[in-house]
Image (cartoon, rainbow, N blue to C red):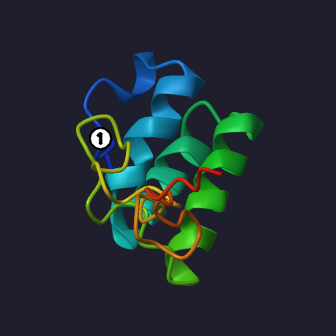
């Protein structure tokens, strides 16, 4: 049975781009509720695809919501490649010695 109100504040007034950011912090149960709500209300294909993609990510173990910042962006240091500073395998420290003839 679909929820009477969606688990996202102002859901019905959000553009799809902003909704994409908001659903990143929802649990699997909340995404399922939102899918039911969307199907019984506006039934927008683009939104349902977005929600289904998020649900698929959650059920496959995507932890995108864990450690997410205020807008669903990863916290500093959580980004892919965050360990590419000096001393990492991908970015060795520069050789400080200069050879002169």
For this orientation, the residue located farthest to the right is: 45
The answer to whether residue 22 is visible is yes
Q: Say which residue appears at 31% left-offset and 57% top-offset.
A: 77
Q: Quadrant of residue 64?
A: bottom left
Q: Position of residue 37 (x, y in %)?
A: 47, 47
Left or right relative to 34: residue 39: right
Q: In front: 41, or 65?
A: 65
Is residue 88 depicted above or below 48 in this figure?
below
Q: Position of residue 56 (x, y in %)?
A: 62, 72
Q: Say which residue appears at 64% left-offset and 38% top-offset.
A: 47
Q: In front: 6, or 18?
A: 18
For this orientation, the residue located farthest to the front is: 101
Q: Say which residue appears at 46% left-offset and 59% top-offset.
A: 97
Q: Position of residue 51 (x, y in %)?
A: 58, 52
Is residue 24 depicted above or below 22 in this figure?
below
Residue marked by disc 1:
5
Q: Position of residue 3 (x, y in %)?
A: 34, 53
Helix, strand or loop at mark 1: loop
Quarter of the image for the N terminus: give it: bottom left
Count neighbours of disc 1 (C-alpha within 10 A) and say few if under 14, some if 14 to 19, many if 20 or more: few
For this orientation, the residue located farthest to the bottom is: 60
The answer to whether residue 1 is visible is no
Is residue 101 depicted above or below 18 in this figure?
below
Q: In front: 51, or 86?
A: 86
Q: Say which residue appears at 59% left-offset and 68% top-offset.
A: 90
Q: How many marks?
A: 1
């Amino acid at each position: 049975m679909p929820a009477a109100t969606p688990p996202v504040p102002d859901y019905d007034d959000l553009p799809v781009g902003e909704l994409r950011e908001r659903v990143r912090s929802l649990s699997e149960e909340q995404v399922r509720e939102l899918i039911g709500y969307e199907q019984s209300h506006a039934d927008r294909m683009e939104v349902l695809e977005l929600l289904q993609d998020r649900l698929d990510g959650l059920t496959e173990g995507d932890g995108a919501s864990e450690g997410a910042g205020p807008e669903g962006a990863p916290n500093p240091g959580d980004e892919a490649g965050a360990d590419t500073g000096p001393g990492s395998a991908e970015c060795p420290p520069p050789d400080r010695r200069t050879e002169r003839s």
